[in-house]
Image (cartoon, rainbow, N blue to C red):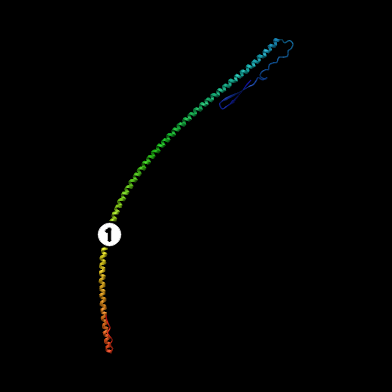
Amino acid sequence: MAQESPRETTGGLSYEVILKPASAENTPRPISPPKEKPGITKEEIERKHAEAEERKLQLEAQRQKALQESKQKADEVLRKKLEQEAEFQKASEEKMVKRLSSMEEKRETQISNLQKKMNEHNQRVKEVQAAVERYRKLLEDQIDQKLKAAEANRCQQIQGMVERLREHAKHIEDAKAKSDAFSKATEEKIIRDMETTLKNKEEQLKAMMERLKEHERHVMEVKSRKGTVPAPMETN
């Protein structure tokens, strides 16, 4: 007899078929021929043997039929399982294709965004380079103007210094001339003062000599009056 028990799997429902020989409960056992008794003929024995053979064939046919049905059910379960696996594989492939397509679209979008950002970055770099070039040119112009202005100021300062040096040299010459004139006048005045002083000294000395001679004469007169006449003093 065949027994079937349903069993759930991940892919669907399967059946487990167990085959076993007919038991005494379901199939009646063939009746063994009784012992020969007096009165049983050969034809009766052959008939019973034929009936037993027929029952055996019927049991074999039933077993084959059960096996065939079990095989058909197993094939049906296998077919359904294969169909489910095919559907699952197809769904998985479609899902994978969609996922790959989505990933490809995302990758293309990312590449497009990256290229856009790179273009914007390159544009900003070009703008910055242009601004730097303009600023560099402006600085060069300003430095050139400052150098020219500094050169002009330096020339003016040098010219002013030359003029001041000329004025200073002229002032020195004038001061020297005035100093020479003042020195000459001062020297002449000093000489005149010295001559005047010497003349005054000579006159004073002469007056003193006169007073001294007068004093000596007076002394001699006094002494002559007393009777003593000293020798007169020598004068240079």
Q: Indicate the quadrant containing the N terminus: top left, top right, bottom left or bottom right.
A: top right
Residue under circle 1?
169
Give the residue at the far right of this rendering: 38
Above or below, 135 relative to 42 = below
Q: Where is residue 104 in the image (x, y as percent from the top left)?
A: 46, 31
In the rendered structure, the answer to whether residue 74 lies left or right of residue 221 reads: right
Question: Which image quadrant for residue 126?
Answer: top left
Residue at point 27%, 59% (across, down): 169
In the rendered structure, the answer to whether residue 124 lies left or right of residue 234 reads: right
Q: Position of residue 181 (x, y in %)?
A: 25, 65
In the rendered structure, the answer to whether residue 18 lies left or right of residue 220 reads: right
Above or below, 81 relative to 225 = above
Question: Which image quadrant for residue 174?
Answer: bottom left
Q: State the SS at label 1.
A: helix
Q: Where is residue 172 in the image (x, y as percent from the top left)?
A: 28, 61
Name the foreground residue: 37 vs 134: 134
Q: Which amino acid does label 1 sit on?
A: Ala
